[in-house]
Image (tube, grey):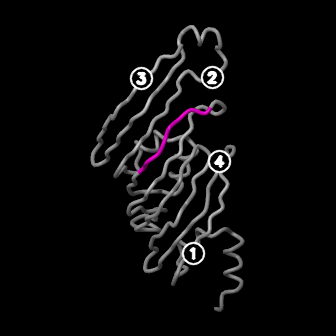
Amino acid sequence: GEDHMTIKDAHFQHGDAKMSVKGVVQWASDEERAAHPATNPTLRPSLTIAATDVPIDDTLLAALPPMHAKWLQKLNAQGRFDLAGKLTNSPTSGLDFAFDVSLHDCKLWSQGDRYAINGLTGNLKLTPTTLTLIDLKGKRGDSDVAAQGQVSWPGNVPQMQIVAEAKNLALDEPLFNMLPEPAQRSWVAGRPE
C-alpha cells in the first residue's frame, strides 16, 4: 500500500518573496520498500508551486541543482522573478519539474560598480535538463539588447544555442573582453585605425 500527504494550500513568505504549494506527496510503505528496494523512488511528489518576487541570491543558489546554480553564478545574475509550475517524479531520473519563470529588472555580468546588462525582463522555461529563454529584453548602456534560445545540461557540460541582438551597441572594453578570442582577433585585424 501507499502512504501520502496532501498539501491543500501551504503559503510561505521570506522577505518580499511569497510562495504557495499544493498537491500530494506519496511514498511507498515499509513493506513495498522491503519487497522492491531498488525500484521506484520512495517519494513521489505531485506538487503545484507558485512563487512571486523571489530574489536571485545565495539562498536560491543553494536550493538549485548544481549545474543550474553554477550557470547563474557565472552570469553574476541579480534581480527577482516569479515562478509557476509542477514538481513531480520521474521513474528514470528522480525529481522532475517544469517551471515558467518571469524575470523582473534583472542584471547580468557584474563589472565592478555596474552590470553589463540591466533592466532584464522576459520569460524562461526551466526543466531539469533545459533552460529556454523566451523574449528576453534589457539594456546595455543606451543600447537595447534581446535574446532567445536554450541552454541544456544533457551531461556535465552546458550546451548553449542563444540568439542575441543589440541596437546601437558600443564595443567598449568590457564587451570586447567578453568576446571569444577569435572574435577579438578579427575585430583588431579589421579595425580601421
Say which amino acid is labelled 2. Answer: Asn
Say which amino acid is labelled 1. Answer: Glu
Depth check: give the residue in front, 76 or 83: 83
Q: Nearer the viewer, mark 4 or mark 2?
A: 2
SS at circle 1: strand
Magenta-highlighted stretch: main secondary structure?
A: strand
In the rendered image, residue 64, in percent from the top left (x then y), is placed at 50, 41
Say which amino acid is labelled 4. Answer: Trp
SS at circle 3: strand
Q: Give the range drawn in magenta.
A: 83-90
SS at circle 4: loop
In the rendered image, residue 182, in percent from the top left (x then y), is placed at 72, 71
Number of residues whose C-alpha sits closer than 10 Å to that of mark 3, classed few (under 14), some (14–19) or many (20 or more): few
Q: Name the residue under label 3.
A: 5
Question: Could you give the CA–CA distance between mark 4 and mark 2, rounded to whole angstroms?
Answer: 24 Å
Q: Does the magenta stretch include residue 22?
A: no
Contact, CB < 8 Å: mark 3 with mark 4?
no
Number of residues whose C-alpha sits closer than 10 Å to that of mark 4, classed few (under 14), some (14–19) or many (20 or more): some
In the rendered image, residue 15, in percent from the top left (x then y), is placed at 27, 45
Question: Could you give the CA–CA distance between mark 3 and mark 4, rounded to whole angstroms?
Answer: 32 Å
Residue shown at the point (71%, 83%) measured from the top left? 189
For marks 1 and 4, the one nearer the N-term is 4
Q: Mark 2 points at which residue?
A: 40
Label disc, if present, on residue 153 of the rendered structure = 4
Examine the rendered structure and indicate whether residue 129 appears above or below residue 182: above
Examine the rendered structure and indicate whether residue 130 appears above or below residue 116: above
Q: Nearer the viewer, mark 3 or mark 4?
A: 3
Which quadrant would the N terminus be assigned to in this image?
top right
